[in-house]
C-alpha cells in the first residue's frame, strides 16, 4: 500500500516518454506469451501461421484468448499463489462425509480452490470485482458441494455455481468454508489472524509486516491485563484498534471443535456475537461500525484500497515480479482503466497485456520483462496440450500436490510453507521436466504409432529412416519445432542437423524408430526454451 | 541403537575438494589438515531440528527452581557443567548423557522472544524472524550463500521451509519418497499411467545431447534476463545430473522418524550434497494437558537422537576438519515455549518466550546466555558480551537468526532490517 501513498505526491509524468522503452517482442513471441498466460498452452499452428502472415492479428487473438474457457483455470492457478488456500490436506477428509477414499483428490481440490473459482467466475463473466466480497454464491465441485450445506444438485458433476443453505451472510469469499479452513483461528486469537488474512489478500495491507512491540509491563498471565493493553497500550493499540473490531465480524466462523464435521462445515449465526465475550469490541471496519459479515464485504468493496490491491495483484501476476517505484505511473493508469470498466477484471488484464513492460522484447532494463519462466502448472498444461499426457498418481494431479506429487519440486507453491513460486530453474525442476518429458514422449509416440490421425508425428510413419526418407525426417523435425516452440527452422539449419544426429545415434543403439523419436521428442520437451516465454 | 555412518564417496564433490585441499597442503601452501585452527565460515554446515508444537524449556534448558512464578518439575534438579546449567531428571538419562558428553560445544539461548502465541506465526518467526510473507528462513539464506557449490543447498527432510524469494535453494525430499522416485525415474512407473524409462544407454545419449544443448543456449543469450535464466538452467541441469549419481548413496525414501531424518541429513551433508538440512520432531509437544509426563518423554526421546547425531557427526570425516562435528552447527529449536504455570488440566499453554540449543563450532559452547525474569519473561542482554544487562535488548528469534548468519560470514543487514547479531554468542 506504500505505493498509493507515494502516488499521492507524484506528478503527471508520461512514463513512456520518461524512459527508453525497449522494442516490443515479435508478434509470434507475444502470441505465445499471452497464450500461455491466458490459456496455459502454446499457440496452435493455425494461430501461429495467422500471426506470421499478419502480425497485427495478434491483437484479435489476445481478445479471443481473454474469452477462452481455459482462462478460468489460469485465474485459479495464478491466484492460488496469492490466496494460498490450495493445500494438500484439511481438518476433514472426503471419507468424513461418506465419500470414498478415491474422492479425496477431488475433495482437496474442491476445498482448496473455492476462493479462486469465485474470482474466476467474477473475471470470466465480467461481474464487478466487488462481487468477490459481496456475492451470495460460491463455486464448488460435486464432492464438496454435496458434503457441505449447499444447494449443489444431486446427480450433477463438476464445478458449479451454488449457494450455501445454512444462513450465512452474502459475503463472497469472506463467507466460504475454504477461506476459514485455511486460515484457522485458535481459541485466544479471536479471528485476528483471519482479519489480517482479509487485509492482506484484499487490501494488500499486511499487519504482520509491522514489527510487533512487546511491552514487558503487561503481565501475560493476566488475561484481563492483556485485553486492556490491546485497547490502551500504544505498542498494541496501533494495530489492534482496527484489527480487533475487524475480527469481530468473523465469529460466525468460530469453531469449538476444529475437526468436528458439523462445527466447521456450517456457519453459526448464533456465534456472531461471541465478540462480546472475546474482546468486547463491536464489529467495525476502520472505525465504521457494522453488524454482519455481509456488512464487512460491502465496506471492503467500498474501500479504494480494494480496487487498488486488485490492480497490484494483476500486475504482479502477469509480470512475475513485485511492484517497482518505476511502475507508479503505470499502475495509476491501470487503476483508472479498472475503475472506468466498472471494476471488471478482463479489461484490466487486457490493459496489463498492452503495457510495454509486458510486451518488451530484448532489453536489460529490469523494469521490463522480456522473458518469464512457466509455472509448474503451465509446464504440465503445455505438455498436455502438445502430447495429451498428464501425470497423475492415485488420482492426484502430480503438479498440484505434494503429498504424492511434485508440485514444490517443480517450483510450485504449497500454500503453507512454500508461499512463492520459483522464478528460475533449479535442480528439482529440471528433474521434474525430464521425467515429464520422458513420459509424455513415450505416451504420444505410442499413441501416434496406432493412430490414423497422429498428434505430433504427422510427417512420417514410424518405418522411415534417414536413409529411406530423409526429406520426411527433416520435415518431421521442423514440424516438432514449430509445434513446440513456434519456431520455423531451416531445412539445413543447425537444429535439424543436431536432431537428426541424435535420432541416428539413438536408432543405432535401439534399432527402433519409435525409441529414436521418443528420444528426440524428450530432449525437445526438456529444452530450456520450453520453460521460458 | 546403532547408526549407519556413511563415509563420503570418493567421487563426491566435497571429497574431491578435500583431496585437492590436501594436495595443496602437501605442496607447502597454507592448508592444515585437521581442525587445528578456526574453520572458515564457509566450511560450516547446519542442521536445524524443529520441535513443532511448543516445548517446555523448564524440563531441560530453563533453570528456574528459584523462580516462584514457575512450576518446575518434582524430583528434578539443576546440574552445572562448566558454565552450563541444565535441568536433570531421572526419567531423562539421555539428557544427562548428552550434556556430559557434549556440553563444551553446547550453548543454551534462553528467553528467546517470539512475539506471538499462535503456532503458525511463531513457527514463521522462529525460522525467519518475522511473520511477514516473503522472508527466507535461516537455512535457506545460509545455503544460498554457497548455492552453486551444492546440488541440494538446503534439504528439507521434514518440517517447515520458508524459502521466500530463494525458492530454488530449498528442496523437500517428499513425504512419500517422491524425490527418490524422481531421481531413479521410478515415479513414472508408479504413476496412474505407468511408463517405462528409456534404456540406460539411450538416456546417456540424451543426457549428452542435453549438456551440449544447454551450453549452447547459455552462449547464445541475447539479453540479461535470458542469460540469467539459461545460466540457472545450466547450473540446475548439472546439479540434477550429480544428484542422480547419488541415488544409491543415501536412503532417500527414509521415514518420518527423527532418526531416519537425521541419518539422511548427515549423509547429504557428508557427501557435500547439502550445506543445510532441516528436520522435524513432532511427538506431541503441544501439551495443553499432561504437560509434565509428555514433555519429559519427548525430551528423552529427542536427546536420544541428538546424542546419536553428535556421535554420528564425530564419526564422519569432515570436509576440512577431522570430523563433521567440527564443521556442523546443530540448531535445536521449538517455535514457542509454554506458560510458567500449569492450567487446570495439568497442562501448560502457549508462551511467547522459548529457548534454543545450539551445538557445534563457532559458538561459545558450555554456556547459557539469556534467561528469565520473575514473570518468566526473557532477560535483556548486552549483544557484545551476551551477558544480562538491564540496558540491553531482548533476545529475539530474529537476533539469534542474525547471529547464525553472522557465524556464516553473511551480513545480516542484507536480510534483516534493524536486527543486530548477538556477537557475544560467537567465538
Image (spheres, rainbow, N blue to C red):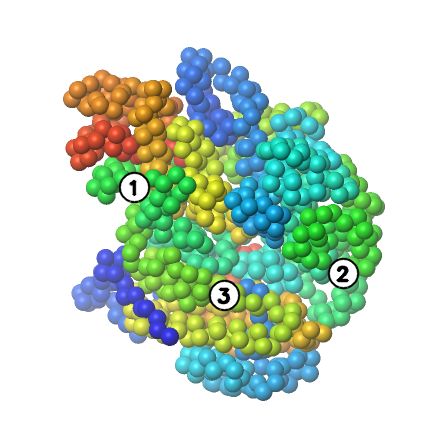
Please give the chain letter of the residue carrying mark 2.
Answer: A
Say few, some or many: other residues with alpha carbon within 10 Å of mark 1 (under 14 / 14 to 19 / 20 or more): some
Q: Are marks 2 and 1 in contact (CB under 8 Å)?
A: no
Residue A435, given in percent of the width and then of the height, sits at 35, 41
Q: In the structure shown, which secondary structural element does the residue marked by tag 3 occupy?
A: loop
Occupied quadrant, residue A522: top left
Looking at marks 3 and 1 on the same chain, the residue that comes earlier in the sequence is marked by 1
Same chain for labels 3 and 1? Say yes or no: yes
Query: Residue B197, which numbered label?
Result: 1
Q: What residue lies at 72% left-to-right and 58% top-to-bottom?
A: A256
Depth check, front residue: B1 or B240: B1
Query: Residue B281, which numbered label?
Result: 3
Residue A107 lies, with reference to residue A260, above or below; the image says above
Q: What residue lies at 26% left-to-right and 21% top-to-bottom?
A: A461
State which mark lies toward you, 3 or 1: 1
For marks 2 and 3, give the CA distance. Answer: 34 Å
State which mark lies toward you, 2 or 1: 1
| Any part of residue B224 in sight | no
Q: In the structure shown, which secondary structural element does the residue marked by tag 2 occupy?
A: helix
Amino acid at each position: 500500500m506504500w505505493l498509493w501513498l507515494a502516488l499521492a505526491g507524484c506528478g503527471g509524468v508520461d512514463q513512456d516518454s520518461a524512459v527508453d522503452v525497449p522494442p516490443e517482442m515479435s508478434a509470434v513471441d507475444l502470441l505465445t506469451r499471452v497464450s500461455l498466460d491466458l490459456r496455459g498452452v502454446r499457440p496452435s499452428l493455425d494461430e501461429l501461421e495467422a500471426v506470421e502472415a499478419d502480425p497485427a492479428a495478434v491483437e484479435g487473438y489476445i481478445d479471443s484468448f481473454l474469452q477462452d474457457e481455459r482462462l478460468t483455470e489460469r485465474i485459479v492457478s495464478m491466484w492460488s499463489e496469492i490466496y494460498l488456500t490450495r493445500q494438500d490436506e484439511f481438518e476433514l477428509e472426503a471419507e468424513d462425509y461418506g465419500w470414498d477414499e478415491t474422492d479425496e483428490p477431488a475433495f482437496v481440490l474442491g476445498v482448496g480452490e473455492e476462493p479462486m473459482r469465485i474470482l474466476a467466475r467474477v473475471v470470466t463473466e465480467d461481474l464487478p470485482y466487488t462481487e468477490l466480497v459481496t456475492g451470495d454464491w460460491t463455486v464448488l465441485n460435486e464432492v464438496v458441494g454435496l458434503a457441505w450445506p449447499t444447494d449443489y444438485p444431486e446427480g450433477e458433476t463438476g464445478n458449479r455455481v451454488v449457494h450455501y443453505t445454512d444462513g450465512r451472510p452474502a459475503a463472497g469469499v469472506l463467507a466460504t468454508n475454504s477461506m476459514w479452513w485455511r486460515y484457522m483461528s485458535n481459541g485466544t486469537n479471536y479471528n485476528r489472524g483471519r482479519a489480517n488474512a482479509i487485509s492482506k489478500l484484499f487490501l494488500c495491507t499486511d499487519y504482520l509486516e509491522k514489527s510487533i512491540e512487546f511491552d514487558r509491563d503487561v503481565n501475560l498471565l493476566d488475561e484481563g491485563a492483556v485485553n486492556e493493553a490491546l485497547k490502551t497500550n500504544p505498542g498494541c493499540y496501533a494495530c489492534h484498534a482496527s484489527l480487533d473490531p475487524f475480527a469481530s465480524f468473523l465469529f460466525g466462523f468460530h469453531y469449538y471443535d476444529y475437526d468436528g464435521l458439523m462445527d466447521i462445515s456450517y456457519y453459526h449465526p448464533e456465534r456472531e456475537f461471541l465478540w462480546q465475550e472475546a474482546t468486547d469490541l463491536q464489529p467495525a471496519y476502520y472505525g465504521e461500525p457494522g453488524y454482519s459479515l455481509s456488512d464487512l464485504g460491502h465496506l471492503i468493496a467500498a474501500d479504494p484500497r480494494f480496487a487498488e490491491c486488485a490492480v497490484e495483484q494483476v500486475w504482479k501476476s502477469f509480470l512475475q515480479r513485485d511492484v517497482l517505484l518505476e511502475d507508479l505511473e503505470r499502475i495509476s493508469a491501470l487503476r483508472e482503466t479498472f475503475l472506468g470498466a466498472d471494476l471488471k477484471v478482463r479489461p484490466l488484464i487486457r490493459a496489463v497485456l498492452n503495457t510495454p513492460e509486458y510486451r518488451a522484447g530484448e532489453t536489460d532494463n529490469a523494469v521490463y520483462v522480456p522473458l518469464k519462466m512457466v509455472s509448474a502448472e503451465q509446464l504440465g498444461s503445455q505438455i498436455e496440450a502438445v502430447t495429451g499426457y498428464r501425470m497423475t498418481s492415485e488420482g492426484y494431479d502430480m503438479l498440484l500436490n505434494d503429498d504424492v506429487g511434485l508440485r514444490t519440486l517443480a517450483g510450485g507453491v504449497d500454500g503453507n510453507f512454500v508461499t512463492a513460486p520459483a522464478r528460475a530453474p533449479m535442480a528439482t525442476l529440471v528433474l521434474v521436466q525430464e521425467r515429464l518429458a520422458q513420459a509424455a514422449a513415450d505416451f504420444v509416440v505410442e499413441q501416434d504409432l496406432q493412430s490414423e490421425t497422429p498428434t505430433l508425428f504427422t510427417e512420417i510413419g514410424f518405418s522411415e529412416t534417414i536413409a529411406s526418407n530423409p526429406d520426411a525426417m527433416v520435415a518431421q523435425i521442423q514440424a516438432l519445432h514449430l509445434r513446440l516452440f513456434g519456431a520455423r527452422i531451416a531445412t539445413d539449419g543447425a537444429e535439424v542437423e543436431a536432431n537428426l544426429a541424435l535420432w541416428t545415434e539413438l536408432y543405432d543403439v535401439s534399432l527402433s524408430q519409435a525409441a529414436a523419436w521418443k528420444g528426440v521428442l524428450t530432449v525437445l520437451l526438456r529444452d530450456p526454451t520450453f520453460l521460458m516465454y | 541403537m546403532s547408526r549407519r555412518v556413511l563415509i563420503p564417496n570418493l567421487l563426491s564433490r566435497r571429497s574431491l575438494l578435500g583431496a585437492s585441499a590436501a594436495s595443496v597442503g602437501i605442496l607447502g601452501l597454507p592448508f592444515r589438515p585437521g581442525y587445528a585452527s578456526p574453520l572458515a565460515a564457509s566450511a560450516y554446515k547446519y542442521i536445524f531440528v524443529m520441535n513443532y508444537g511448543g516445548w517446555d524449556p523448564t524440563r531441560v534448558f530453563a533453570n528456574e527452581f528459584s523462580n516462584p512464578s514457575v512450576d518446575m518439575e518434582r524430583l528434578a534438579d539443576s546440574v552445572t557443567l562448566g558454565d552450563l546449567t541444565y535441568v536433570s531428571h531421572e526419567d531423562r538419562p539421555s539428557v544427562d548423557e548428552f550434556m556430559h558428553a557434549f556440553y563444551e560445544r553446547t550453548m543454551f539461548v534462553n528467553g528467546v522472544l517470539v512475539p506471538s502465541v499462535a503456532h503458525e506465526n511463531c513457527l514463521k518467526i522462529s525460522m525467519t524472524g518475522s511473520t511477514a510473507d516473503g522472508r527466507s528462513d535461516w537455512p535457506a539464506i545460509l545455503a544460498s550463500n554457497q548455492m552453486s557449490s551444492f546440488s541440494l543447498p538446503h534439504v528439507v527432510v521434514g518440517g517447515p521451509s520458508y524459502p521466500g524469494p530463494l525458492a530454488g535453494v530449498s528442496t523437500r525430499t517428499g513425504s512419500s519418497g517422491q524425490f527418490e522416485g524422481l531421481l531413479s525415474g521410478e515415479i513414472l512407473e508408479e504413476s496412474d499411467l505407468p511408463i517405462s524409462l528409456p534404456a540406460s544407454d539411450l538416456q546417456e545419449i540424451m543426457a549428452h545431447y542435453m549438456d551440449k544443448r544447454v551450453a549452447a543456449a547459455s552462449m547464445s543469450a541475447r539479453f540479461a534476463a535470458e542469460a540469467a535464466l539459461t545460466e540457472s538452467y545450466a547450473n540446475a541441469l548439472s546439479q540434477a545430473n550429480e544428484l542422480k549419481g547419488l541415488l544409491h548413496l543415501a536412503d532417500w525414501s527414509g521415514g518420518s522418524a527423527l532418526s531416519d531424518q537425521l541419518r539422511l541429513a548427515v549423509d547429504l551433508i557428508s557427501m557435500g550434497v547439502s550445506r543445510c538440512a532441516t528436520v522435524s520432531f513432532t511427538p506431541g509437544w503441544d501439551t495443553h494437558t499432561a504437560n509434565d509426563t509428555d514433555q519429559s518423554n519427548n525430551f528423552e526421546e529427542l536427546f536420544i537422537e541428538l546424542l546419536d547425531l553428535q556421535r554420528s557427526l564425530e564419526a564422519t570425516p569432515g570436509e576440512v576438519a577431522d570430523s563433521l562435528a567440527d564443521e556442523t552447527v546443530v540448531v535445536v529449536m521449538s517455535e514457542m515455549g509454554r506458560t510458567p504455570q500449569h492450567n487446570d488440566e495439568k497442562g501448560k499453554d502457549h508462551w511467547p518466550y522459548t529457548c534454543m540449543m545450539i551445538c557445534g563450532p563457532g559458538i561459545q559452547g558450555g554456556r547459557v546466555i539469556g534467561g528469565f525474569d520473575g514473570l518468566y519473561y526473557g532477560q535483556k542482554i548486552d549483544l557484545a558480551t551476551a551477558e544480562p544487562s538491564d540496558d540491553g535488548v531482548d533476545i529475539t528469534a530474529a537476533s539469534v537468526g542474525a547471529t547464525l548468519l553472522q557465524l556464516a560470514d553473511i551480513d545480516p543487514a542484507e536480510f534483516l532490517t534493524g536486527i543486530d547479531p548477538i556477537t557475544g554468542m560467537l567465538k
